[in-house]
Amino acid sequence: MPWQRLVADVGLEIDPDTGVFAYREVWVSVPRQSGKTTLVLAWEVDRCVSWGEPQRVAYTAQTGSSARRKLLEDQVPIVERSSLGTLIRPPRGKVYHSLATPAMVFGGGSRIDVNPTSEASGHGQTIDLAVIDEAWKDEDDRREQAMLPAMRTRPMAQLLGCSTMGTDASVYLNRKVEIGRAAAVEDPGSGIAYFEWSVPEEEDIADPEVWWRYMPALGWTVPQSAVEHEIRTMDVDEFRRASCNQRTGAKKRLIPADLWDAVQDPSAVPEGEPQWGLDVIRNIDGHADAGAIVAASDGKAALVDARPGTGWIVERVVELHRRRGGRVVIDGGGPAAPIADDLEDAGVPVVRLPGGMAVSACGRLYDAIADGKVRVYPSQEMDESAAGLAKKPVGDRFVFSRKVSSSDATPFLALAWAFSRAEAVEEVSPWASFG
């Protein structure tokens, strides 16, 4: 397609004075399904088969597993079906399918490797072409920092970045877009080559004439009928991002900000003998060990403590129980279970919510917030926990997820456990003991 030819022609320009690439870094941003994978693969394969010495290509996507799938399920089959297929088949080359080190090795020694996304992944190797695919998912520059040092001694090395636009949370890509747009305006002829096809914010995204002006694959690989279907069925923000290549706001909150703000109350201090919600998280997906304690009674709840680590929890809960009484409520199948054993040994009564009740607790808190039937003492930790909250489906219901949430979910989960128990205690009829 013309847009692919333009990017390749400019991005691979050679500076006649130095004999090296004019652009050390090339960035491309286009709508989804515009032919980005084809361009990236052609760039990679050209590196591997057109040079006099073996070249090393490092391919990365938003996660290591995603990069592995794209290499083995998208790129390898295309090369195998082409006239270059013999170069990656024994005895000349080989495709490695291992989980740890997937790779496409060409006759002559050049190779395309999947690089992990950690900062240390490029250590101990040299890289001639570094590919950062789907950069909109990155909230930091760890992929770039992993590969740039490995390119330092290679005068003809290039970094190729490709992505559809992201959201306000796409910190890394947004910075590259700003730098790239400035470079395009300045047009220095070296350093960074930046290419972007997106619908301007002021244009009508429902107008087919606008689509034809700004969607580079329309009429080539994407029919107009496909875009018409997308705008009728997709969330408008996702249509703007994926189809129009516009930056959008951060992902919608599970607990809308207006509902959360409505239940914030500086006078919401639990009185009497409260229920203590306790939750912890164990070092998963970048979240360090942490714990949180929430008190709840009479429809009011407050975060009592939230700290990194878990070694402080038992002593703190014992202290709170001695002062105020009450029971500690945990997710019986969650990571706080071993701590609950220690609390019981210390004389603190513990309520272990079984799986079904933990699911119900999350749903009841969600409904209580939506209906304004709970008041929460304001705190920054609880605000941050609520803002990044995500859910995990459990049948037709859900629980708040420690693993998927973008923030520390423990304060909010502790709130769910404490509120559910406090609400249950308050609903007990005073006549129940008379049978």
Image (cartoon, rainbow, N blue to C red):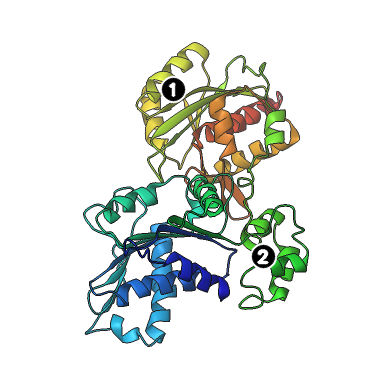
Residue holding disc 1: 348
The amino acid at mark 1 is: Val
Asked where in the image residue 281 lies, by quadrant, the reply is top left
The amino acid at mark 2 is: Tyr
As drawn, 106 above or below 13: below
Q: Looking at the image, is mark 1 or mark 2 earlier in the sequence?
A: 2
Query: Does residue 222 appear left or right of residue 64 in this picture?
Result: right
Return the residue found at the far top.
323
Residue displayed at 60% across by 63% down: 31
Looking at the image, is mark 1 or mark 2 nearer the viewer? 2
Query: Does residue 29 appear left or right of residue 192 in this picture?
Result: right
Residue 191 image position (x, y, % from top left): 42, 54
Residue displayed at 36% across by 65% down: 16
Quarter of the image containing the C terminus? top right
Q: As rendered, which of 409 and 203 lies closer to the eye?
A: 203
Q: As rendered, which of 140 and 416 lies closer to the eye?
A: 140
Asked where in the image residue 360 lies, by quadrant, the reply is top right
Name the mark on residue 214. 2
Q: Is residue 352 visible?
A: no
As drawn, 305 above or below 116: above
Name the mark on residue 72. none
Secondary element at image label 2: helix
As drawn, 119 above or below 225: above
